[in-house]
Amino acid sequence: MKMQLIYPTWPRLEKQTQFHLPPHGPVVFAATLPEYVEVDFIDENVQPLVYDPDIDIAGLSVMLTCQLPRAFEIADRYRGMGIPVLFGGIAVMLHSQEVERHADSVFLGEAEGRMGEVFSDFRQKKMKKVYDYMNIFPDISLVGTAKRDILKRDLYNYRGIQMLDLVHASRGCRFNCFPCCNGFLGGRQFRPRPVETVIKEMESIPNNRLFIVDNSLAHDKAWLIELFTAMKPLKKKWVSHPLMDDDQVLKLAAEAGCWYVYQAVFDTSAVIENRIKRLHDHGIGVEGTILLGTDDHDETYIKTLVDFLTQIKIDLAEFTILTPFPKSPIRKQYKEQKRILSNNWIDYTCDKVVFQPKNMTCEKLEELYNYAWDTFYSNGGYQTKMGELFFKVIKKEILDKTYRRYNPREKRSFKKTKPS
Ligand code: SF4
């Protein structure tokens, strides 16, 4: 049985350097499929989609709300050709009713242990309209090594620099931050994978550079210690979301190859300043993630925050405009206050104002968003600062003899076809 698995394109943050990481959802999903399903994976962000009349089923893997309009176009076209379409992924869970209108079948939830049922139904021509496994989480030990051989690996490099491979070591998050949908998606219970299965997966990845995409590495100290201790001999270099702010954890993370972390910067407090300093003291770089437009933000606050980032010598900053995604606590509040201005999902890219800010006009918030990017990067653009971070990892790799120069002659052949 042949499935074309498609990861639709979406508009990027204009201010950010355009590079593409190999997606995680599709490779995790592909690992859950029965062996008789042959997958042809198309990441529309790096290659053209050619509609294939000979497939048995089209799969649409959708992570982001702003991917949905393109996903619907693709689905409608395939269904018009008489080819059934199955949808899955984070954005599908957030927008399930709307997705149903463009799908033959919608899978909601985590796929491990469930695809046998879905594809058996498909073979018997009795696939259900909806497979609803929301909040019924599979045993975490069923999460195996993602199927990365579906990726066309040579498409993921930026100017000769090999991009990072994505991997996850846990699911769920006990926090419930106001702009986040994770409580709805992955549940409020932290679910760590057994360390030995994570290590086995990391060992199988040919790339030395990883992005550990777990929601947060700040839940369980004992598990983190076990994980980082086991990772150390692999000599991988990795990036992650926030790390537990604990001396023992930070030291072990650095020894296990932590290269830089994403850290939310929401105020100019000494707590944030110390956290960044402690990461730097351990040789770990920091990319600040800064959400603009919350109810306590006004023009002065945002300008002070931008100055603060420069003062504390944060390595990189990613500014985004607060976006009330479906199922997030903030959307519920803004809906009640009638402050949602747009439900056009193509605008949910985090660089457009789709709600009414409390202390300024929409235009002012957009102006301040541009001000933040332009001011922070006035002494060297994003590419320059990113280049400095990459230089740091190359130095680390040279020191422990894991540096591997990108060799274009290793490229797989990729037959270019015209987009349909
Ligand atoms: S923002 Fe991060 S830490 Fe907060 S709830 Fe979402 S996943 Fe958890």
Image (cartoon, rainbow, N blue to C red):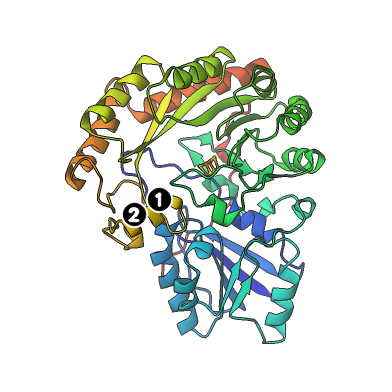
Whether 375 is drawn above or below 325: the answer is: above
Badge 2, how many Cα within 10 Å: few under 14, some, many 20+?
Answer: some
Work out whether residue 236 or residue 249 is closer to the camera in this orientation and state it.
249
Looking at the rendered structure, the kind of residue marked 2 is Tyr
Q: Is mark 1 on a helix, strand or loop?
A: helix
Q: In which quarter of the image is the N terminus?
A: bottom right
Q: Distance between the residues labelled 2 and 1?
A: 6 Å
Q: Tell me if residue 62 can be seen.
A: yes
Q: In this view, does 9 lie to the left or right of 111?
A: left
Q: In this view, does 65 lie to the left or right of 256?
A: left
The residue drawn where x is 20% and y is 38% is: 367
- CB within 8 Å, label 2 to label 1: yes
Work out whether residue 267 or residue 149 is closer to the camera in this orientation and state it.
267
Residue 259, quarter of the rendered image: top right
Q: Where is residue 162 in the image (x, y as percent from the top left)?
A: 55, 36
Q: Where is residue 135 in the image (x, y as percent from the top left)?
A: 64, 61
Q: Tell me if residue 150 can be seen.
A: no
Whether 304 is drawn above or below 241: the answer is: above
Q: Assess mark 2: CB under 8 A from ligand 1?
A: no
Q: Assess mark 1: CB under 8 A from ligand 1?
A: no
Q: Quadrant of the C terminus?
A: bottom left
Residue with the mark numbered 1: 330
Residue at far front of view:
336
Badge 1, how many Cα within 10 Å: few under 14, some, many 20+?
Answer: many
The residue drawn where x is 51% and y is 22% is: 285
Q: Where is residue 21 in the image (x, y as percent from the top left)?
A: 52, 44
Residue at far right of view:
196
Looking at the rendered structure, the kind of residue marked 1 is Ile
Work out whether residue 143 or residue 17 is closer to the camera in this orientation and state it.
143
Q: What element carries label 2?
A: helix
Residue with the mark numbered 2: 334
Whether 266 is drawn above or below 270: the answer is: below
